[in-house]
Amino acid sequence: ADLRWTHPRGDHYESGFEIQTIDPASNVTLRRFVDECIERMPHYERHELVHGVWRTTMTTDSWQPDAGFTVASTESPHTVAFFHAAYSAGDARMRERIRKLAELSITHPERRYDM
């Protein structure tokens, strides 16, 4: 394996190592391991209101944006549509409440906010 030093790549850093040769059995095992790690990784949808249009981004980061909200990717489309409507029509106080509900849907997934 060759070491690759961490270096800036756009607005984030990337580091890792490259495997030059690997036997087929180890390759299968390594791929399964990586796939299992990816499956366990939480995924989120970030919804940002940009110039009156909703932009949705899949992400592994749960932070709440200034102009929108982030929810678990398992959140129902009905709830997301409700959040879109309430956020779009709401004032600053209402928008903060929507962000808080979205945050709670991530930190307490056992609680449901289906509308």
Image: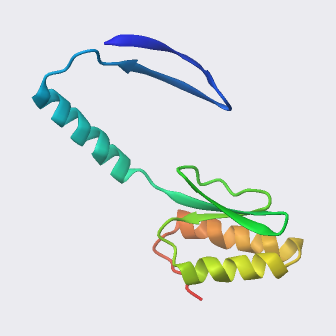
Q: Position of residue 45 (x, y in %)?
A: 58, 61
Q: Is residue 41 above or below residue 113?
A: above
Q: Position of residue 33 (x, y in %)?
A: 25, 39
Instruction: Give the position of the N terminus as an image quadrant.
Output: top left
Query: 56 or 44: nearer the eye?
Result: 56
- The residue at 52%/73% (across/down) is 75
Q: How many marks?
A: 0
Whether residue 82 is visible to the viewer of this picture, yes or no, is yes
Q: How is the image coloured?
A: rainbow
Residue extending furthest toward the top: 2
Q: Is residue 70 left or right of residue 25?
A: right
Q: Is residue 29 left or right of residue 34?
A: left
Q: Position of residue 53 (x, y in %)?
A: 77, 68
- The residue at 17%/36% (across/down) is 28
Which of the 4 image quarters holds residue 55? bottom right
Residue extending furthest toward the bottom: 115
Q: Is residue 56 above or below residue 75?
A: above
- The residue at 22%/16% (across/down) is 21
Whether residue 113 is visible to the viewer of this picture, yes or no, is no
- The residue at 55%/79% (across/down) is 77
Q: Position of residue 51 (x, y in %)?
A: 85, 64
Query: 20 or 71: nearer the eye?
Result: 20
Q: Is residue 74 above or below residue 62?
A: below
Q: Is residue 55 left or right of residue 28?
A: right
Residue extending furthest toward the right: 91
Instruction: Give the position of the C terminus as an image quadrant.
Output: bottom right
